[in-house]
Amino acid sequence: MILAVDANVLVGLLLRPAGQALVRHSALNLSVADVAWAEAEHNLRRRVLGMLQHGRLDDAMAEFILNEALRIGRTQVELVGVTSYAIYESEARRRMPHDMTDWPTIAVALLLGAAIWTEDRHFHGCGVACWTTETLPRQLPDQLSLLPHP
């Protein structure tokens, strides 16, 4: 399954072992717009720093978790540069009337003929199939082990 991944999904998944397993699933071919990856990377660092500042992690664990999240993201998700998806900018902007900063994710989906993996409802109705982290695992082989635990 080919998916253009929104930044919010990556942040939510890459900091948890179960999320990392889902990102690594062999049935998924994941891509992310360069600006969405930059946003995800920034928010990953911010979240880990917050956990460190609130005493939920020590320095060594914070560094390990961040490095592992970044490593998995960089190896499992293909980065798509603006020079590749810019040809779809006008179309993507027309399809995203609410949050204009998310047009690159739609453009990547259009470029690749992919669906979008997001938790943001404003993508719904953009003319591209959207999956959430709750519904996506149900479509994959070995889905029972990947479903989020309550």
Image (spheres, rainbow, N blue to C red):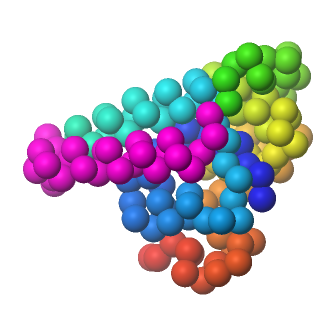
Q: How many marks?
A: 0
Q: Position of residue 149 (x, y in %)?
A: 46, 76
Q: Position of residue 78 (x, y in %)?
A: 63, 40
Q: Position of residue 100 (x, y in %)?
A: 68, 21
* In this view, 150 is above or below 84: below
Q: Quadrant of the N terminus?
A: bottom right
Q: Quadrant of residue 82?
A: top right
Q: Quadrant of residue 4?
A: top right
Residue 69 covered by magenta stretch: yes
Q: Would residue 135 be seen by someone viewing this image from the given angle?
A: no
Q: Is residue 24 left or right of residue 112?
A: left
Q: Is residue 43 left or right of residue 101?
A: left
Q: Is residue 75 left or right of residue 101?
A: left
Q: Would residue 58 be seen by someone viewing this image from the given angle?
A: yes
Name the residue rendered at 45%, 76% in the picture. 150
Name the residue rendered at 14%, 40% in the picture. 53
Name the residue rendered at 32%, 35% in the picture. 45
Q: Magenta: predominant secondary structure element? A: helix
Q: Which residues are magenta?
A: 51-79
Residue 70 covered by magenta stretch: yes
* In this view, 20 is above or below 85: below
In front here: 141 or 122?
141
Q: Position of residue 140 (x, y in %)?
A: 71, 72
Name the residue rendered at 50%, 27% in the picture. 38
